[in-house]
Amino acid sequence: RGKVRLPGSKSISNRVLLLSALARGTTEVEALLASDDTKVMLEALHALGVNWSRHEGTDDYRVEGVGGAFPEKYANLFLGNAGTAFRSLTAACAFAGGDYSLSGVPRMHERPIGDLVDALRLAGARIDYTDNAGFPPLHILPPEPTGQPIRVKGNVSSQYLTGLLLAAPLLGREVTVEVEGELISKPYVEITLNLMQRYGVTVTRDGWQRFTVPAATYQSPERIEVEGDASSASYFLAAGAIGHGPVGVEGVGRNSIQGDVRFAEALA
């Protein structure tokens, strides 16, 4: 029995950081997860010309959005083993009009990224593999936009689709993203769509096969609180059920945008 305050969701934390960076206006980000992935994302955004500061003694941050593409046009980004940062930043840098190098630890260079690169190239991205084809490290040059729809495989990683959707407004036109085959991890794509809407960009979708991103610029919501991690919540909820509780879990609730919150419904 007792109460636990959850750490912030990693999935939401890195999406919010990127959205806040690309948005017009300043965003107060509250309860950001303290992790390697968010640390890597913050360092990368700083290298790309985004100003941010941490409120001392808290996990709250102030992010000054750039209102579009990154202002720094030359950057060498070391992204460690942070998959969420690597995939979303690959897409954002591909459309940002700069000369960027993205690398990570040896393990990251073993994680395939070819399907995302292929999708970005359909939109005119100029991306080269600097070692093994289909894997990081990457060298990105300013794009040569094509105007055609973007197609991505649905059965590889929802992070690829998330990266494409988050970066699409940087192209300055309406963008259609088509999913080939069955889309996996739909709840994580739902998180992306929900957060994009919080930042003023509403994506319309035809089932889970076609997504249309309007020509728009992200607008800061001024303040956003990162939900507690719903996956972590499940263990404590289960402990309360097994041990006859009560166990209070704070930081996430029934209105969460995370699919894993439905574990509470399963218990009920």
Image (cartoon, grey):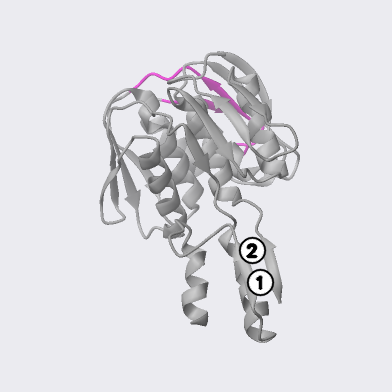
Residue with the most extreme left position: 206
Give the residue displayed 44% in from the left and 59% down from the top. Answer: 187
| Disc 2: which residue | 232
Q: Nearest the camera: 23 or 2? A: 2
Secondary structure under tag 1 reads: helix
Between disc 1 and disc 2, the foreground one is 1
Mostly what secondary structure, the magenta segment? loop
Percent coordinates x, y for residue 89 in the rendering: 55, 32
Taking 71 as reference, is 56 above or below it?
Answer: below
Q: Residues within 10 Å of mark 1 (few under 14, many from 20)?
A: many
Residue 265 belongs to the span the image colors magenta:
no
Secondary structure under tag 2 reads: helix
Give the residue displayed 50% in from the left and 62% down from the top. Answer: 253
Q: Quadrant of the N terminus?
A: bottom right
Percent coordinates x, y for residue 186 in the rendering: 42, 58
Q: Which label was assigned to residue 236? A: 1
Disc 1 versus disc 2: distance between alpha carbons? 7 Å
Percent coordinates x, y for residue 3 in the rendering: 68, 67
Taking 21 as reference, is 87 above or below it?
Answer: below
In magenta, the rendered stretch is 125-145
Q: Are marks 1 and 2 in contact (CB under 8 Å)?
A: yes
Query: Can residue 97 be seen from the camera position used here?
Result: yes
Give the residue displayed 53% in from the left and 47% down from the top. Answer: 12
